[in-house]
Image: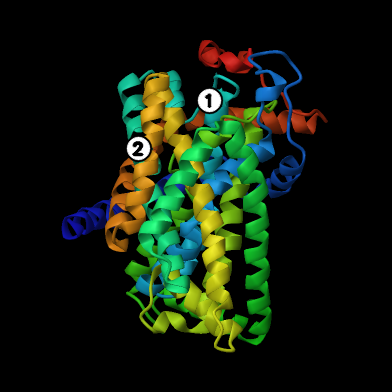
Amino acid sequence: MEKIVTAVSGVLTDYVLVVTLLCAAIFFTVITRGVQFRMVGEMCRLLVKSGKRSSDGCRVHSHGSVSSFQAFAISIASRVGTGNLAGVATAIAIGGPGAVFWMWVIALLGASSSFVESTLAQLFKVKGEGAFRGGPAYYIQKGLGKRWWAVTFAVLITITFGFAFNTVQSNTIASAFDECFSFPREWMALILSLLTLVIVFGGIKSISRFSEVVVPVMAIAYIVLALVIVAMNIGRIPEILLMIVENAFGVGQAAGGAVGMGMIMGIKRGLFSNEAGEGSTPNAAAVATVSHPVKQGLIQALGVYTDTLVICTATAFIILCSGMFLEGHDGIVLTQKAIDAELGGGHQYGSIFVSLAILFFAFTSIIANYYYGETNIRFIRDNNLLIGIYRLLVGVVVYLGAVMSLDLVWGFADITMALMTLCNLVAIVMLGKYAVVLLKDYVRQKKDGKDPEYHSSTIPSIASETECWH
């Protein structure tokens, strides 16, 4: 099975996905005039000050509203996890240091894709029980009028996030604890499965509260550790940066594959981590209560930078400073050994910290991944029995992922991720014109000194489909 999965994954992700993803990112960067670069200041301002709708419209009751920061935290919970610690390590082990450069490239360009898809999710969102709901399935059906396409995406994202990605997350946690504490995988699988079931039966509000507390704390702690290690190697930073750039273009290959492999691994693992254009983030972006769709588009674009340019880069620097990527290690074990090597003294303090960090990072990803699946199941059929079955299946899959092989779980995740991303990218290319109109409307109101508000009458042709903005 591993051989079959690896072969299919290689063709689908190494060629079709990488090319399509880059082309779409460049296209969105052009039509938005580089929104991800020229509005960074506005992104940061909006994150601090959550927007609130001042008009009635399709508002939920105050007890059910989710702030911009909470929506940001949910999406970061899904982004920050295995991809940042294990995915980066795998990319460097296989593609060499140059893979880091291509991670940066796909983050800088892909932030525009994230802006477009998240803005569209806000535009076409609907009122749910206790909070808004939305995402690619909703904007495909409402914006393109293609129910079959929308259902196809909903099925793909449920399989990808609810099942495939969650096997990767639980597998990484189990591997980390096995390496550091020799903790039996079966016991870790059981613990993760039970904890997942307890939280997912609590609903979106419990997910947002859990995420907004745990994720920032662990992310800051991990970044602080990375900064300490970088400071210890400050004299080597120019050398590390030069190594990354040279290897990206085939000069002085230190380890891993050639230029093409570095590009492929950097883009694949970058996408797994930051999810730009993948179609997952819009599900979290849609739940926020804001006065203009562009606000969530900008905030989620900032999430791409936070994930890749900050956290993934921190992991890359730790690994490259240690030189452990030359020792044949892979995945989360490489990150653990790199931190241990840098802290020195023969202790396993680094492995212990990474084990705890990946526990929180990957576990919050499991919870956020589950939510993406629930949202899309409710889109297909809003039935509580189906949701109950889905929750139980997620618990089972989390258990299985922890005891499966690394190559198998990554292979499945790559295949389902590629299919889902391609489905979403075609849709947002066709609907991108609406995001451009919204961006112009937002910028115009800002120039007039207003706190931008959107009303469905701004785009009359789809007014009937944007029910939450009347």
> Circle 1 — which element?
strand
Residue 369, how many percent across, how many down?
Answer: 46, 42
Could you say which quadrant of the image residue 225 lies in? bottom right
Q: Residues within 10 Å of mark 1 (few under 14, many from 20)?
A: many
Q: Residue at x 51, y 14 (%)?
A: 465
Task: Give the amino acid type for the residue marked by disc 1 in the picture.
Answer: Arg
Q: Secondary structure at mark 2?
A: helix
Q: Nearer the viewer, residue 126 or 355?
A: 355
Please provide percent x and percent y for residue 399. Answer: 36, 50
Q: Is residue 79 left or right of residue 227?
A: left
Q: Quadrant of the C terminus?
A: top right
Residue at 51 percent of width and 61 percent of height = 84
For the residue pair 158 and 121, the one nearer the viewer reads as: 158
Q: Position of residue 274 (x, y in %)?
A: 50, 52
- Left or right? Give the position of 102 relative to 73: left
Q: Quadrant of residue 229?
A: bottom right
Q: Quadrant of the N terminus?
A: bottom left
Disc number for residue 133 = 1
Looking at the image, tell me whether mark 1 or mark 2 is earlier in sequence order: 1
Characterize the local packing of mark 2: few (<14), some (14-19) or many (20 or more) Cα atoms within 10 angstroms: some
Residue 347 visible somewhere in the drawing: yes
Is there any visible trace of residue 30 in the rendered image? no
Indicate which label's residue lies in the foreground, 1 or 2: 2
- Asked which quadrant contains residue 345, the reply is bottom right
Q: Is residue 345 above or below residue 331?
A: below
Q: Is residue 187 above or below residue 136?
A: below
Q: Which residue is mark 2?
A: 393
Residue nearer the viewer, 289 or 422: 289
Residue 191 or 81: which is nearer the viewer? 191
- Considering every residue shown, the one lying at the far bottom of the view is 345
Distance of mark 1 from mark 2, alpha carbons?
22 Å
For badge 2, the amino acid type reads Leu
